[in-house]
Image: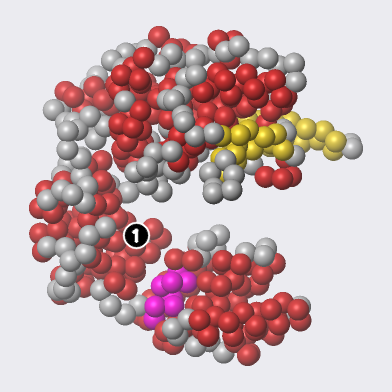
Amino acid sequence: MFGFRKVRMPLTTFQRVDIELLMRRTIGEIGLPFVRQAQVLTSLDELSLDQTSAETLVETARAAVVSRLPEQQAVCEVQIVADSEIGYPSTYSATTDHSPAVIRLARRTVGDPLRTVMELAFQLSCHHWHGVPAATELDRSARTSDLMPVCCGFGVLGSEACLYDDQWSQAGWAGWSISRSGYYSTVEIGYALALFARCRNEVPPDWADALRLDSRETAQLAWEFFERQEKAGDCLLFDAETIPSTQADMSQLATWFVGADPAYALASGYALAKLDGLSPRAVEAAIQASRFGDPDVVPLAARVLGKARSVTPELEKRVSDLCRRSKPRITVAAMQAAVELKLPLDGYRRKLAKLFDYFAGDPSPILELISSQGQKLAVLAPRIMPRLALALRDDDKELVDACLVCLLRIRADTDHLIPKFIKAEDLRERVRARLVELEGSENL
């Protein structure tokens, strides 16, 4: 009752590691001096926006954003298009040999000045990364590019723009919907802003009170968490001189993997998962991490076990135990490791059937697991057919092909199954024709 209040961890380990490493990457790209000099915007009133028309709003919003982002050399056009043309608040198309880069803003987006500013900030940040010669696919994804506006002073506005509660009425009907601007949630933006303030040596910053409540609470939790880490003598990944990566010594990665800090464990696990032929020490670390690790670390540890050079009785037993776990993320990771180690999965038919239903929204990983076992899992073909029918209805060509490849690899009786589960004759013919194409192109 009278003890010290325990400081809660902000976000999950995965979220913290992801944001800390990507913020490091972003700050490294634009430079710490630039970040420290950035003016933090707390209101649209601080920008000179001309809202006379959609066109003038976009023109002045773009000028305001460009003036606060790192200098960009490549041309980037901005267009206002009908909502139905893109289906998103905004999109970005990179430069090609025939045309410059283009940002398209939905007409509905430019009806809101705040959302207009933030969508331009996100897409112009993406444009910046496309101009960096050594940029990776991750650098150019929203996971990284959407953090640049935070580092350039747009974080408070981004927090406010993150969630939109839209109310509408039409032809006697009324309703509401929630939409999102940007990749990150309000609490994730709060954590990114806590790191932003930390690297500027302003904790707590003057602008904290301007944050929406959920972002502000996360930022406050983060600052308390940082203080606790410092008192314990622990170093954040965000601040570390050396971070876990594929360039690090495998023995050091193994030490981090079983260390007390789940952030370092997760980052080292990602590095180990990219390597092949792990040393016995690294495999033992993965086994330990799979027993006692953080909820985000355990599935990764299970996946890392598949990188072992050889299968020992201890390793085989651990992978088998993990395959039987009740948590789907762990089970799938362990089964993927089993496939890499060439351990059979035909003893987990019921488990795979349940996983297929659990991951009905995106069953591709389960289809790959079933495919890997060939005819031994042909009994699961009837489970696949309803999902194939839905993919056909939704015109999801990628999932249709994934289902069909799986059916071919397990040698399913498609002549019997197709008419049973697919009623429309035109769809049946389409499936049969596609099966012939895939059978000719796949090494089945």
Left or right of residue 300: residue 232 = left
Where residue 185 appears, as percent x and y from the top left, is 49, 34
Q: Nearer the viewer, residue 410 or 109?
A: 109
**What secondary structure is marked by label 1?**
helix
Residue 157 sits above or below residue 434 on the image: above
Residue 372 covered by magenta stretch: yes
Q: Residue at x 63, y 90 (%)?
A: 415
Looking at the image, the residue that sits furthest to the right is 171
Left or right of residue 5: residue 439 = right
Label 1, residues with CA under 10 Å away: few <14, some 14-19, many ≥20: many
Residue 20 sits above or below residue 312 on the image: above
> Which residue does the numbered mark 1 point to in the structure image?
330
Asked if residue 189 can be seen in this view, the reply is: no
**Model colouring:** secondary structure
Where residue 295 appears, as percent x and y from the top left, is 32, 49
Left or right of residue 68: residue 80 = right
Q: Residue at x 21, y 64 (%)?
A: 276
Q: Residue at x 32, y 13 (%)?
A: 202
Which quadrant, please, contains the C terminus?
Answer: bottom left
- Magenta highlight range: 366-373
Where residue 273 appears, as percent x and y from the top left, is 26, 58
Residue 102 sits above or below residue 338 on the image: above
Q: Residue at x 71, y 24 (%)?
A: 55
Question: Disc 1 residue type?
Answer: Ile
Which secondary structure type mostly characterizes the magenta part of the structure? helix
Asked if residue 186 can be seen in this view, the reply is: yes
Left or right of residue 218: residue 168 = right
Q: Nearer the viewer, residue 287 or 396?
A: 396
Which quadrant, please, contains the N terminus?
Answer: top left
